[in-house]
Amino acid sequence: MYQDIIRNLSLEEKMRFTSGAGAWHTWDAEGKLPQIMMCDGPHGLRKQKQDAPGQNNDSIPATCFPTESALACSWNPEAVRRMAQAIAQEAIAEDVSIVLGCGVNMKRSPLCGRNFEYFSEDPYLAGTLAVAYIKAMQEKGVGTSLKHFAGNNQETHRQTSNSQIDERALREIYLSAFEMAVKEAKPLTVMASYNRLNGIYACENRRLLVDILRQEWGYEGTVISDWGACVNWVECIAAGMDLEMPDSVGLHIPGNRAALENKMPDIQELERAASNVGKLVTYGKAPKPTQESVTGEPEKNSAQIKEKATLLAEHHKLAVELEKESAVLLKNEDFFPIDAEKTLLVVGELAQHMRYQGGGSSHINASQNTDVITSLQQHGCNVLYCQGYESDSDIVNAKLEQEVIVHLTAKENQNTTILFFGGLSERYEGEGYDRKSYKLPENQTHLLEKMREVNPQIGVITFSGAPFEMPFAKWVPAIMQMYLGGQGVGEACAALLLGQSSPCGKLAESWPISAEDIPCYGNFGQNADDVEYRESIFIGYRYYDTYQRKVSFPFGHGLTYTKFEYSDLQINWKKHLEEHGETCIEGQKEYFGGELEISCHIKNIGSYPASEVVQLYVKNPDCNYLRAAQELRGYQKVYLEPGQEAEVNICLNERSFSIYAEEHSAFIVPAGEYEITIATSSRDPRLKESISVKGISYERDDRERLSEYFQQMKNNTGYGLQISGQQFEVLYGRPLSHLDDRKPGEFDIHDSLECLAKHSLLGKLFMKIAEHIAFSMYPDKKRDDPEVMMTLQGIHEGCLDSVMCQSGGVVPYKIAEAIVLSANKHPLLCIKKLCEKNGGSYENNRD
């Protein structure tokens, strides 16, 4: 029905239809079409009360579930499914058609400020969780937006940077989770990111959006821009983008209209884009399937949505359960669980003002929240509380520290259980800005050392969106990492500490010892537009395990209050060989392709009921080309009562043994001797079995051509993977970009105000004025407040076109054009532009 209306729209109406209406809606074609609404996710519904994208505008109360960084540690697609369906229920109740999530960008560095919104450093784990999220939400009739496609792995200069990634790393690491999600779950939309990928902006990158996404992967949905990422509408539509979000407050319309008059873009591309936007309208207005509660019970009336209060109460309980399944017990020397009968000395402001979510577009107005102190007291615990430090600062407060020491040394407190709550506040990590340091705030580490001098028996509970340096890990008896656990984190934490539930989370990322140990050390967040992924495929455990580097805690690590015994690794050779027409001979262990069934037994030999994640790694054969030592290729989570035993089954396929061969433009399976490893982490193997893979004879030898990569496998520099620019250029296979070396005459509207201000007095003046206006919007907040930092970072580092559009049309567009002319050293043209009577519009001129 709607597609007929869209086909009959004029070209100008179709042009307008491929841009949003306001911040969150599609355009209604002057009443001819219904509008649909999309809202931020991914761990809750952020529906703004006003039609504006800013976080400062209040959003409706919603359930804040554990962030992706936390929930990924559950290693449980079923947990992700339950969360996604709950968010969908809240979206339906608010007439929201699309939730903007989930994010599957790889965790290239723990210093990325937005890592809390992403699942993992491993594409297989991230991909399987994304598939669960997308399928579950769309089964409820709410669309998703798989983001940020692609190569968006840092916040610094995120709108102008060029992610330079070699083809193998791109295919095996940075696109793999997207590929899995697109092929298996078919997200309604894919969100193209801000950054350049190998020299071309994602929204203008036809190879990415058409050649790979649509032609190779078979995607049939709608490609939307990240908010403000569509600068040149003509180029974006021609490259395969369908919908510009949000609208440009009219600033792009005159330029787009002029392009149409010049028959740009190609009419078929415009028809395609309009048709794909129409799919969103059709989907959004389709009848919703029967609604079910989070327990799986169908509603009495499928057309009747539960009362919002009832829905939120149910979902809060779910949020608590999900965080209990996601928290990671990093270390435990018989300290946890604690005795509820003993007095608890709780130290740290983050125990009272708990950080349970990140800042930025995913910030949820949580429907409720109970801190861990209150939760412990509700369980009957006697709690003494000391603030200890100020969470919005890293400056040591001697008075607060002394208060802690007084309590520690008091006679009546000699038999207390000491709990320290610490971690990173929003001032250290968030959307729009990366972390400046890998260290914990100094006031926390200083306080811990002071406490250690009195009594080192301290249980540490930490909160953050990503790893940080843990010098105290060597001497404290216990550490539990909650990540950003959503609104139920206080209740979940109390239940875990008291042993009412056993921790069962596993790290979805490696935990480096120091910043210098991160593989991309020196090539991340360097305030440069030229971002070189010199570490290639070696991110996370692929680096640490291949180059044999120490870590604080390995990928997949996580303890429980019980113990598990692994046994009886079996590979179903009979079935596999018969499927390939081979006679099964005893002892024959040859893989010919297709599915390969692996099984093992696991038994709970402890005294607590708990879940364990059985992890399957494939150890790759030695070779003369770059390849990780081992890779995660399967996993399964299983719950066992004490004494209970279960069989775990995991299937492998060709992709489990493959690499991307650029010369073949495809994934191939190199022949060789592989090893199947069942493990509890990437560093804790329990069962092994060697197999022979009958693949392609792949004799590539890169030891001389890429000598720096091989040399460092033997020589530990202690500073990440230190690869020279010249060596990386050989691997990259094309000239590296030099955006930071550009000179006047080479700038355009894509560039940031910060970049242009270096060459333009007008730009510098405008930036100062914009800063002042932005800061005045937050009269009660400091400059290092997360929301203020995100806003100021956007002004400094966002592309100039986006800054103008985000201003809501308050500033005439001709100011932006004049700044570009000024930076390009055309003073007379700059003055002429400023004197124009009209407000100006986007023109893609570079002169």
Image: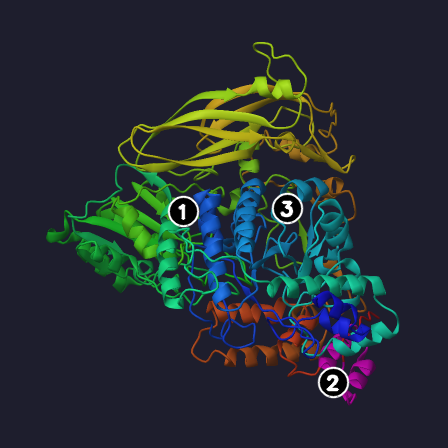
Relative to 689, is 414 on the left or the right?
A: left
Q: In this picture, which residue range is highlighted in magenta?
A: 813-840
For mark 1, give the secondary structure.
helix
As rendered, which of 719 and 267 lies closer to the eye?
267
Q: Residue at x 74, y 75 (%)?
A: 252
Is residue 467 among the parts visible in the rendering? no
* Quarter that holds the C terminus: bottom right
Q: Residue furthest top?
A: 586
The residues bearing labels 1 and 3 have C-alpha atoms spaced at a distance of 24 Å
User: Going by the picture, which residue comes out furthest to the right?
Assistant: 262
Residue 298 inside the magenta-drawn segment: no
Q: Which residue is mark 2?
A: 839
Q: Nearer the viewer, mark 1 or mark 3?
A: 1
The disc, 1 or 3, on the residue closer to the chain's N-terminal end is 3
Residue 840 drawn at (x, y percent): 76, 82
Left of 780 or right of it: where is 577? Answer: right
According to the image, label 1 marks what residue?
Answer: 326
- In terms of sequence position, does the residue under pointer 3 or pointer 2 come before the other? 3
Q: Residue at point 20% right, 52% down? A: 344
Residue behind mark 3: 174
Whether 378 is drawn above or below 367: the answer is: above
- Is 824 magenta? The answer is yes
Residue density around tag 3, few if under 14, some if 14–19, many if 20 or more, within 10 Å: many
Q: Residues within 10 Å of mark 1 (few under 14, many from 20)?
A: many
Which of discs 1 and 2 lies nearer the camera? The answer is 1
- Residue at (58, 20) in percent of width and height: 575
Above-or-below relation of 241 to 633? below
Residue 427 falls in which quadrant of the image?
bottom left
**Please, what is the three-letter code of the amino acid marked with disc 2?**
Gly
| Residue 111 percent location from the top left of the image | 52, 52
Q: Nearer the viewer, residue 260 or 556?
A: 260
Q: Is residue 507 visible from the viewing direction of this image? A: yes
